[in-house]
Image (spheres, grey):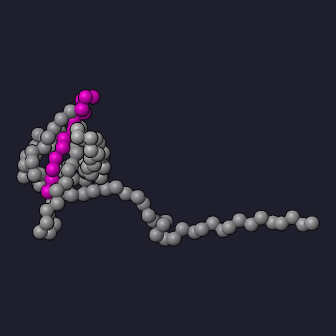
């Protein structure tokens, strides 16, 4: 009795779209602060600054929560005020927490990696 030969399925070739697809989490916005930046320090001493930025490409304004850390945080708190224009590069981050009333909360914010002033 002859042994049967095992055959393997040919490897599936990637389509051109699959070959060039890269996952990315990058955000760029240019807008104005809606309130003065809020600077705080973590228990370990790192500076963190929260800001609200408005952008307006059409007739509808969009409002973004932005968080900057360390040097960018301190620069923002020192040099920016409500109405200041700035350009932000960063990434989106979603965080969740339990509110005091026991409900689940969720927020998506931009974590700034670069702040530029005009």
Q: Position of residue 60 (x, y in %)?
A: 13, 66
- Residue 62, image quadrant: bottom left
The overriding secondary structure of the stretch rendered in magenta is strand
Name the residue rendered at 21%, 58% in the picture. 29
Q: Position of residue 4 (x, y in %)?
A: 83, 66
For the residue pair 110 and 98, the one nearer the viewer reads as: 98
Residue 107 appears anywhere in the view: yes
Quadrant containing the N terminus is bottom right
Residue 72 belongs to the span the image colors magenta: no
Q: Position of residue 6 (x, y in %)?
A: 77, 64
Name the residue rendered at 22%, 45% in the picture. 67
Left or right: 7, with 35 as reference point:
right
Q: Report the span colored magenta.
A: 42-54
Extreme residue in the right direction: 1
- Residue 5, image quadrant: bottom right
Residue 50 belongs to the span the image colors magenta: yes
Extreme residue in the top direction: 44
For the residue pair 42 and 14, the one nearer the viewer reads as: 42
Name the residue rendered at 90%, 66% in the picture. 2
Extreme residue in the bottom direction: 16
Q: Position of residue 79 (x, y in %)?
A: 10, 43
Left or right: 75, with 14 as reference point:
left
Residue 84 appears anywhere in the view: no
Name the residue rendered at 29%, 52% in the picture. 92
For the residue pair 76 and 110, the one nearer the viewer reads as: 110
């Amino acid at each position: 009795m002859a042994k049967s030969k095992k055959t393997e399925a040919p490897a599936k070739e990637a389509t051109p779209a699959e070959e060039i697809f890269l996952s990315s989490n990058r955000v760029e916005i240019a807008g104005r602060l809606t309130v003065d930046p809020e600077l705080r320090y973590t228990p370990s001493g790192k500076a963190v600054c929260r800001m609200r930025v408005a952008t307006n490409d059409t007739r509808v304004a969009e409002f973004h929560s932005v968080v900057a850390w360390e040097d960018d945080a301190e620069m923002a708190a020192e040099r920016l005020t409500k109405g200041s224009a700035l350009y932000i590069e960063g990434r989106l981050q979603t965080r969740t927490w339990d509110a005091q009333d026991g409900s689940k909360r969720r927020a998506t914010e931009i974590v700034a990696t670069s702040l530029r002033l005009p």
